[in-house]
Image (spheres, rainbow, N blue to C red):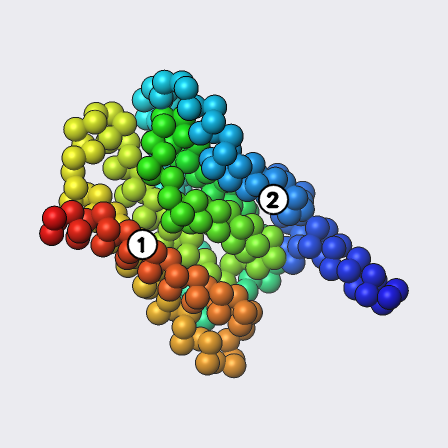
Amino acid sequence: MMFNISRLQSAYVYVTDDPRDSSVKNLPFLSSPFPMIIVIVSYLYFCNNLGPKIMKNRKALNLRSLLIVYNAFQILASAWLLTQGVLYSWPMRYKFFCQPLEIESSEIGIWASKVLAAYYWLKIVDLLDTIFFVLRKKFSQITFLHLYHHTIMVISSYMVSKYYTGGHLTLVGELNSFVHMVMYTYYLMTSIHSKYSQLIWFKKFITQLQMVQFLILTVQSFPTLFWENCDYPKWLRAISTVQNVFMFCLFGNFYKTAYYKKKTN
């Protein structure tokens, strides 16, 4: 019994106080998993329960000015993260199929940890997308795909930022930042003028881009599951593969429902 308690205590200390990269230990929302858990639970509760109840008998809020600023910020932040990702990968230091973890005490390891922390914070900011849907009473936009994607991105970016500096999964952040640049450009256009919401080809392109993203990430991780000499945690490569296949299927189903069926009907 004492042995089990000791192991639980050790696990608790590791999760809360022993990040692989000590340079992120005291950064906001990275000191322990509890702030992240509180954010996720509050987000899901507000979007699924509290928010719709509050807005039920109220008019949808006009957030046009706020959305213009928010979308512009997202474009600039995503562009900066993409630039940092390219600098990390260039010149030809990133091995597509198996990039090992960075040594946390190295100069590039410390730099990568700070960039990953910024990426994690931006995934928290991304949750505002759904909050704005609630306040604008766009409840049809709040789907399982939307909630799951936002939630899993916060959780996964927390884990990578705190425990697994750099390496194989940094390509996720680079591709995601590029897709977000395109996506928030479209959102900025629609927040400036509603006529841009009729650009169905642009909306379809964004979904296609997201599907290509998950396909690339699956191709990147799947072969490495059979390699024993890849110096990156195999369980993370396995989770990445399963997760990206799952997301490809979810977005594929959304694409089929949103565009293909409309065209045939």
Q: Which amino acid does label 1 sit on?
A: Phe
Q: How many circles with numbers are drawn on the protein?
A: 2
Residue plotted at (74% across, 55% down) = 12
Query: Which residue occupies the foreground of this view, 56 or 236?
Result: 56
Expressed as whole percent of the image width and height from the top left, the position of residue 25 reads 67, 47
Instruction: Point out residue 146 in the picture as x, y percentages from the top left corner.
Output: 39, 45
Identify which amino acid the numbered label 2 is placed on: Ile
Q: How far apart are marks 2 and 1 (CA)?
A: 26 Å
**Where is mark 2, residue-wise?**
37
Residue at the spot x=52%, y=54% of the render? 156
Q: In this view, does 207 lie to the left or right of 168?
A: left
Pick out the residue farthest to the right: 2
> In percent of the image, x 32 and y 26: which residue is there?
68
Q: Can residue 238 be seen in this view?
A: yes
Q: In this view, does 26 lie to the left or right of 242?
A: right
Disc 1 crowd rating (10 Å Cα; few below 14, some 14-19, many 20+) is: some
Mark 1 secondary-structure assignment: helix
Name the residue at 51% across, 80% down.
229
Q: In which quarter of the image is the N terminus?
A: bottom right
Residue 118 position (above or below residue 89): above
- Label 2 element class: helix
- Which disc number belongs to residue 128? none
Which label's residue is closer to the chain start, 2 or 1? 2
Whether residue 100 appears in this view of the structure is: no
Q: From this view, report whether residue 244 is shown above or below residue 254.
A: below
Mark linked to residue 251: 1
- Vertical placement of residue 150 versus 43, above or below: below
* Residue 121, image x, y percentages: 51, 41
Q: Which residue lies furthest to the left in this view?
A: 264
